[in-house]
Amino acid sequence: MIQSVGRALDILMTVSDMRGEPVTLGTIAQKTGIHASTCAHLVQTLCEKGFLSQVSRTSGYILGAYAYYLTRYKTFHKELIETCNPALKWIQRRTGHTALLAILVEGEKFVISYAEDSKYLLHERGELFRGNLYNSATGRAMLSTMHRGELASLVQKIGLPREEDWPGIDSLNTLEKELQVLAEKKIVCIENSCDQQYDAIYGISIRAPRLGNCAVGLHVRQEAIPTEEEQRQIEKILLAGTREINRRLRFERELM
């Protein structure tokens, strides 16, 4: 990788991660690990090219017009989103919880569509949200479908999970064994409950051969811990919605 290009992209990603909030030059340099003077030159160049915009000398920078102009023609994986959105909306209606669609791109997990709240609001404006691959149910569900060589290449690129992201995974061998268990279960569930609230993420992989690894997730957040029957019902709905997505994807693939 050309170092200056890589650094410029790191700066853009750092500003983008603030989701519209201005970020100071000092913060950009700190988060990217780029020397302050080098960072200042790169930021100035990105401003001159329109990819960054300076809000003020004290507030810092936001993404510029050209950063958005790059995506003017098409939403990221628009066809996949349009195929999956009806099922996401159905899952949300039946469960009352947020349903989402995730995809694995270059070793990172992105949420590209989701349906939430009692009005079944679908977010179809092309938002992309980066998420942790190892400590998320959708991330682990996608990993569980990988072939051994593919998984080994990914681990070589991004490393093994940190202890706080996935306790007990200290080698490729232990990761493979754990993923095999998850593959047999079909549905991955990660609970993050506290005394006041039950919080869990469910994930299940979907088959999208042309697009790589994808998964449907369900974020369950409520006061009471669900009963076994309620958990079975959640899993039943998630499986049904995923089967419908797979059916639609298979149908579209056969038309091509």
Image: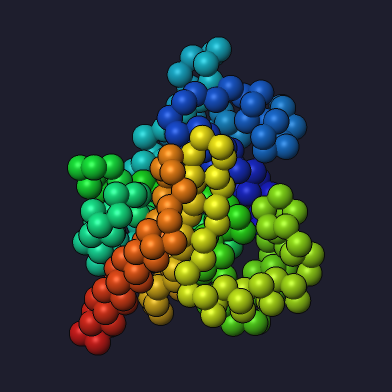
Q: Residue at x 61, y 79 (%)?
A: 180
User: On the rendered structure, is 132 left or right of 215?
Assistant: right
Give the percent coordinates (x, y) of residue 79: 27, 65
- Report the quarter where the N terminus lies: bottom right
In the image shown, does 97 or 232 lie closer to the viewer? 232
Can residue 12 be seen here? Answer: no
Q: Which residue is drawn at 79% across and 65% down?
A: 170
> Could you say which quadrant of the image residue 107 lies in?
bottom right
Give the percent coordinates (x, y) of residue 123: 28, 47
Q: Which residue is drawn at 28% across and 59% down?
A: 91
Q: Which residue is drawn at 75% across and 54% down?
A: 163
User: On the rendered structure, is 164 left or right of 8?
Assistant: right
In the orientation shown, which residue stands out farthest toward the bottom? 254
In the image shown, does 143 or 253 lie closer to the viewer? 143
In the image shown, does 83 or 87 lie closer to the viewer? 87
Give the percent coordinates (x, y) of residue 169: 74, 64
Can residue 218 be seen here? Answer: yes
Q: From what the image shows, is residue 19 above or below residue 25?
A: below
Give the percent coordinates (x, y) of residue 190: 55, 56
Q: How is the image coloured?
A: rainbow
Q: From what the image shows, is residue 89 above or below residue 194?
A: below
Q: From what the image shows, is residue 177 above or below residue 11?
A: below
- Report the quarter where the C terminus lies: bottom left
User: On the rendered structure, is 208 left or right of 148?
Assistant: left
